[in-house]
Image (cartoon, rainbow, N blue to C red):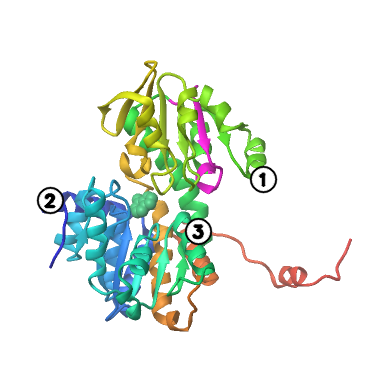
């Protein structure tokens, strides 16, 4: 078996941590058992490009138990947990191509190696498999039934490919399932971003001006948790509705230009490029901390920060100190890459359970129905989304009520008034 991981000796630790994550993934656990029994992926090859974590390891194991031949590569050069990668190779016998801190060239070499199995299904977090296949590996298209996409940024890209009619196979937008983005993006990113900032810096959040650029589901989650830790949250937005929502959620809303002058910690979660630029760095206070929790490392203009600086040094793991011409210092975390996965462990397994249940069941749906789909981006079927919510509630021991037939009739009718 060909693979490329940092150190197979880490496999023991990775296996234990994988087991720990699995304890918090009861829905995926049920799916694992079903897959093992029914083998829905018998003879199916799946290339996955996901953050290589212990939660992802559990998803890969589920697919393999379902009969799939799987290859895994990382969806970010800094997000790999080397022990999880080693455990997958040694104990689950899945080829993994991922090393934490790999350079750009290795990152793409690994993507190509994961594609060498000639997949029928691609599983992406950020659309790197889809873009590589459509640009450099078009020979693979003939085998492919469909793909899944985990994240907002990836879904946006894939929808724009579909709109321009260049998308050559159907995609299921896992991100858009309610049991994914309402939980993973909000509670997952909310907690893990704060976790990443704290592990990297160990700052006290209470009383700090905490600036969040972007008030989508991820931004809402980060704001909620920073607020809970006692920070004074400032939201920057371009969308008037989201800005209004942030105001009524009780946060200060202002332009980034204004926020730059007062912020102590800055987090970008917009999905767009050049959000924090040279102009903002020039206005920041001495000691400002700047991090990104959006998918790509393009939200913070790092080249501009380099140009404005007379020197820099690594002061802690994942903390680089930039010294501006006038001596002010700015601290950039994790090279502007996903802070929650670079310096922490990403979202907790409890929430990845639902995200990856969506991945697993969407892949199964593609095997069953993919050939009848167009080259479009499709939502996760509603029944899958609802089943996952029900399974999660059950696993939490939560019972809910049912509509009576009288209530159903009332909701379906229009005659009854006051
Ligand atoms: N994305 C965010 N957190 C993650 C995790 N723990 N595993 C895989 N992908 C993630």
Q: Is mark 3 within 8 Å of ligand 1?
A: no
On the image, numbered disc 1 is attached to which residue? Answer: 241
Residue 373, image x, y percentages: 48, 80
Whether residue 380 is visible, yes or no, is no
Quick check: 131 above or below 106? Answer: below
**207 in the magenta segment:** yes
Magenta-highlighted residues: 205-220
Q: Earlier in the sequence, mark 1 or mark 3?
A: 3
Q: For the residue carrying disc 2, how many other residues have a C-alpha within 10 Å: few (<14), some (14-19), or many (20+)?
A: few
| Pointer 2 with pointer 3, Cβ within 8 A | no
Q: Earlier in the sequence, mark 2 or mark 1?
A: 2
Q: Which secondary structure lies at badge 2? A: loop
346 in relation to 308, above or below: below
Q: Residue at x 43, y 70 (%)?
A: 362
Residue that mark 2 sits on: 7
Which of the two residues, 15 or 210, is positioned nearer the viewer here? Answer: 210
In this rendered view, identify the residue nearer to me: 386 or 142: 142
Q: Position of residue 40 (x, y in %)?
A: 34, 79
Left or right of 162: which side holds 337? left
Q: Which residue is mark 3?
A: 156
Marks 1 and 3 sit apart, C-alpha to C-alpha, by 20 Å
């Amino acid at each position: 078996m060909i693979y490329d991981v940092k150190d197979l000796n880490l496999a023991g630790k990775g296996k234990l941590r994988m087991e720990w994550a699995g304890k918090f993934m009861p829905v995926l656990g049920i799916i694992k058992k079903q897959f093992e029994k029914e083998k829905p992926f018998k003879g199916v090859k799946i290339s996955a490009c996901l953050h290589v974590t212990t939660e992802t390891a559990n998803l890969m194991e589920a697919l393999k138990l379902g009969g799939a031949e799987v290859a895994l590569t990382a969806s970010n050069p800094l997000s790999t947990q080397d022990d999880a990668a080693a455990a997958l190779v040694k104990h689950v016998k899945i080829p993994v191509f991922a090393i934490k801190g790999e350079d750009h060239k290795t990152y793409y070499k690994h993507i190509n190696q994961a594609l060498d199995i000639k997949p029928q299904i691609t599983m992406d977090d950020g659309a790197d498999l889809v873009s590589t296949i459509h640009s450099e590996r078009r020979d693979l298209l003939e085998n492919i039934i469909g793909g899944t996409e985990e994240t907002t940024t990836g879904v946006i890209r894939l929808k724009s490919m579909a709109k321009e009619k260049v998308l050559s196979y159907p995609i299921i937008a896992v991100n858009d399932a309610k049991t994914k983005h309402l939980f993973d993006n909000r509670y997952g990113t909310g907690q893990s971003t704060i976790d990443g900032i704290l592990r990297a810096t160990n700052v006290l959040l209470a009383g700090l001006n905490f600036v969040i650029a972007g008030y989508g589901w991820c931004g809402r989650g980060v704001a909620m948790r920073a607020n809970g830790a006692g920070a004074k949250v400032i939201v920057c937005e371009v969308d008037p509705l989201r800005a209004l929502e942030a105001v009524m959620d009780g946060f200060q809303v202002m332009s980034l230009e204004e926020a730059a002058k007062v912020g102590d910690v800055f987090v970008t979660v917009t999905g767009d490029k050049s959000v924090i630029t040279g102009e903002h760095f020039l206005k920041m206070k001495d000691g400002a901390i700047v991090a990104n929790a959006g998918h790509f490392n393009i939200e913070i203009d790092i080249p501009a920060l380099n140009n404005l600086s007379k020197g820099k040094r690594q002061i802690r793991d994942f903390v680089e100190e930039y010294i501006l011409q006038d001596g002010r210092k700015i601290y950039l975390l994790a090279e502007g890459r996903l802070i929650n996965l670079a310096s922490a462990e990403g979202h907790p397994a409890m929430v990845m359970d639902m995200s990856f249940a969506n991945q697993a069941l969407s892949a199964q749906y593609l095997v069953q129905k993919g050939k009848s789909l167009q080259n479009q981006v499709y939502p996760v079927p509603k029944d899958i989304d609802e089943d996952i919510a029900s399974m999660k509630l059950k696993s939490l021991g939560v019972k809910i009520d049912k509509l009576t037939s009288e209530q159903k009739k009332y909701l379906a009718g229009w005659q009854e008034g006051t």
